[in-house]
Amino acid sequence: MQFRALKVADAYEFTPRAFPDERGLFVAPFQEDSLIEAAGHPMRVGQTNHSVSRRGTIRGVHFADVPPGQAKYVYCPAGSLLDVVVDLRTGSPTFGQWDAVRLDPVDFRSVYVAEGLGHAFIALEDNTVMSYLCSEPYNPPAEHGITPLDPALGLPWPADLTPIVSEKDRSAPTLAEAEEQGLLPSYADCTAYYEKLRAR
């Protein structure tokens, strides 16, 4: 398993080795040892999520209050998507920046999104499947969003796709509005939480 740090601090891309043969193919998209090497701690799995999306569907930008937040380890077993991580942590050296990774069942890349970071993706074809390992169960009062259409963020949605966005995501605040409303996690709180995880 190879991994690399993304431009947004505390987010990583993982690329496993695939083993094809006459029967088909085997691959292990999540390998705990590689995650520990990258993030410095294991990931508790409190919930798994599975979504199927039409071409052009955008889900996100979603994040949760920290602590405990909700780290995510995501991959795409069918179809293809552009996965986007946004730094929403006030005070972070990469605040407001994003990075994107194409996920598909060709290279079997995965992305780890630490607590406090925003996550979104767009399906590049019909019947695109996204699978998530989540460190915490869904907690509606602690869940928030930033509109994925915020022009100030300038997220890399392909121009040849017509966005399909839920009303909840479309009407979510912009990054600037969320910061004004005090919705965003702080970098100090997030890094303190990461250190707590590493000390376990």
Image: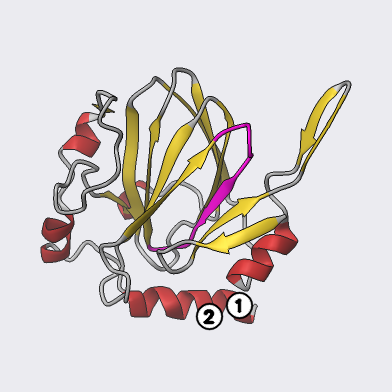
Mark 1: which amino acid? Answer: Arg
Q: Is residue 89 left or right of residue 172?
A: right
Lateral position of residue 32 relative to residue 92, left or right? right
Q: Residue furthest right?
A: 22
Can you identify the residue that label 1 sits on?
198
Q: Residues within 10 Å of mark 2 (few under 14, many from 20)?
A: few
Residue 86 can be seen in this image: no
Left or right: where 188 falls relative to 167: right
Element on which disc 1 rests:
helix
The kind of residue tagged 2 is Glu
**Residue in the foreground of this view, choosing between 144 and 92:** 92
Q: Quadrant of the C terminus?
A: bottom right
Q: How is the image coloured?
A: secondary structure
Magenta highlight on residue 35: no
Q: Residue at x 43, y 43 (%)?
A: 83
The CA distance from mark 2 to mark 1 is 5 Å
Could you tell me which quadrant the N terminus lies in? Answer: bottom right
> What x and y, as percent, mark residue 75?
57, 41
Q: Position of residue 46 (x, y in %)?
A: 58, 51
Image spot of residue 40 (x, y percent): 62, 73
Query: What residue is shown with label 2?
Result: 195
Badge 1 density bin: few <14, some 14–19, many ≥20, Cα 10 Å: few
Q: Looking at the image, how many numbered discs can be counted on the residues?
A: 2
In the picture, the disc for residue 45 is none
Magenta highlight: main SS: loop
Q: Give how far across and how far down residue 107 sits, in percent.
A: 63, 39
Q: Find the magenta span and give its range.
A: 104-116
Residue occupying image coordinates x 19% and y 41%: 149
C-beta proximity under 8 Å, tags 2 and 1: yes
Q: Is residue 126 above or below residue 159?
A: above
